[in-house]
Image (tube, rainbow, N blue to C red):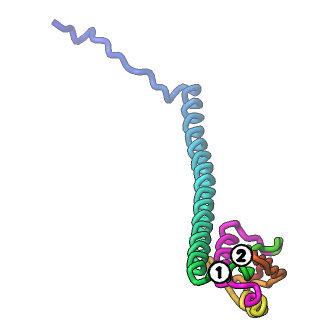
Amino acid sequence: MVNTGTLILMRVPPIYSRKGWQRFLAGFSVGIIFGWLFFLMLFGIMYEKQITSIKEQKIEIYDLKTQNQTLLDDMKSYDNKDIEKTLLVKKIQVTFEKDEDLPLNSLTRHELKKDIQTELNDLLNKDLGSVARTRSFVIKSLENKTLTIDNIKYGFEVKEFILWTKVEVVLTIHLVQ
């Protein structure tokens, strides 16, 4: 038989009323929030680097595929004797001069470089004589070209145009209004 009058009820002491526990729980929750924000920041930086790396690699793969296809097409159209007799353009290299007035991120630079290289891909496997005759036309077409990336229009000025089996073009970039 249970005596209800002598039943002792036990209760859990309230943790929230102790100052030490309050400080511990507040510090723990603030630490979790700061840790989560730090993780998100580091993850975002890493993810941005990966996206930039993947885009650069896609641009390079596209350039190599088009260059390979051009070389294969031209190899079929020429005799081996003709190739040995004439010098042909084998590679195109586009570089931009540093401009502190126009800060560009690396992704925009790579997209501009890819677009300029696709413009110049017609020069691949052409003999140096015909490219030299049309050099002024190529320079004018590059200087008149405007490219739009992220709703910003970019124009170019040719600083150097070196013509050999590797065409080297040095450009400066400026904004077009």
Boundaries of the magenta span = 102-131
Residue 110's quadrant in the figure? bottom right
Marks 2 and 1 in Cβ contact (< 8 Å) = yes
> At 67% across and 78% down in the image, what residue appears?
117
Q: Which residue is mark 1?
A: 121
> At 67% across and 80% down in the image, what residue appears?
81
Tag on residue 105?
none
Say which amino acid is labelled 1.
Asn
Task: From the top left corner, tell me how far across and down residue 133 is, in percent.
Answer: 77, 93
| Precedes in sequence: disc 2 or disc 1 | 2
- How many numbered marks, from 0 up? 2
Magenta span dominant secondary structure: helix
Q: Is residue 109 magenta?
A: yes
Residue 104's quadrant in the figure? bottom right
> At 74% across and 75% down in the image, what residue appears?
94
SS assignment at label 1:
helix
Name the residue nearer the viewer: 38 or 167. 167
**Label 1 Cα crowd, 10 Å radius (few <14 / some 14-19 / many 20+):** some
Q: Is residue 12 magenta?
A: no
Q: Which residue is mark 2?
A: 92
Task: From the top left corner, tell me how far across and down residue 65 is, in percent.
Answer: 57, 71
Of the 4 image quadrants, the one containing the C terminus is: bottom right
Say which amino acid is labelled 2.
Ile
Please indicate whether residue 163 sits to the left or right of residue 70 in the image: right
Task: From the top left corner, tell me how far across and down residue 121 is, in percent.
Answer: 65, 81
